[in-house]
Image: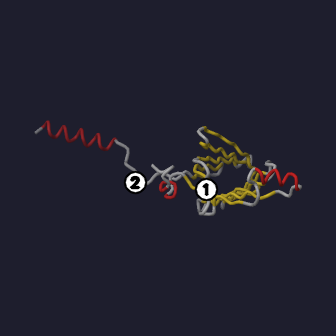
Amino acid sequence: MGTVAFSLACLTFFALSLPAQRTERPIYFEADAFGFSATGKWVPADPNDKPSFPSETEIDCEKKAMNCVEATAEYYFGHPHVSISYLQAFKWDSDGIIATSSSGACMTNTVLISFAEKKITETDSMKHIDDKTKEACNAFGAKQTTTSLFVLKGSARWNADPTTGK
């Protein structure tokens, strides 16, 4: 009987030392007094539009510097691609962050982060530009204001997507 008790004690110890199985994945959205970080992907706000390529984006903001860095990894035409955008936060309070970048030739990019809703939206708005530049922008698909929603990694929508959910 001592061997059975020892075996049960070992099994119990082993089972308790294993990490708990999670039924839900963590949501990648974190804000504190010093900064903000989120991981997910941008999708068009219009449900009729689909993302062009599989991607994943990380947004990191530093409160002291009032700036954000947005890094996106995409895979298209058989090759990986990484892009980095820098945004200047002009509003940061307990409700969220508003950050913009006007470094692009055609569009001004505005990111709105809501801490309470754990929601991020992005709007790309046409700049006031001359007709020749506007024509060049149109050739690259920058024709009008677009809005995208950020799907947080680990969220129900992320997990439901066959290209991201596991």
- Under mark 2, the amino acid is Thr
Quadrant of residue 73 in the image? top right
User: Could you tell me residue 31's position as x and y percent?
Assistant: 61, 53
Report which residue position mark 1 lands on. Answer: 43
Which residue is painted at 69% across and 43% down in the image?
84
Position of 74 with respect to 20 (left or right) is right
80 or 152, nearer to the observer: 80
Give the structural element (helix, strand or loop) at label 2.
loop
Q: Is residue 99 above or below residue 86?
A: below
C-alpha gap between disc 1 and disc 2? 25 Å
Rendered location of residue 109, percent (x, y) = 74, 54
Q: Secondary structure at mark 1?
A: strand
> Which one is closest to the eye, mark 1 or mark 2?
1
Label 1 amino acid? Answer: Val
Give me the disc on residue 23: 2
Extreme left residue here? 1
Q: Quadrant of residue 148?
A: bottom right
In front here: 103 or 138? Answer: 138
Residue closer to the observer: 2 or 147: 147
- Establish if 21 lies above or below 79: below
Circle 1 crowding by C-alpha within 10 Å: few under 14, some 14–19, many from 20:
some
Q: Badge 2 local density, few (<14 within 10 Å), some, or many (20+)?
A: few
Label 1 vs 2, first from the N-terminus: 2
Picture coordinates of residue 37, whole percent (x, y): 61, 49
- Asked if marks 1 and 2 touch (Cβ < 8 Å), the reply is no
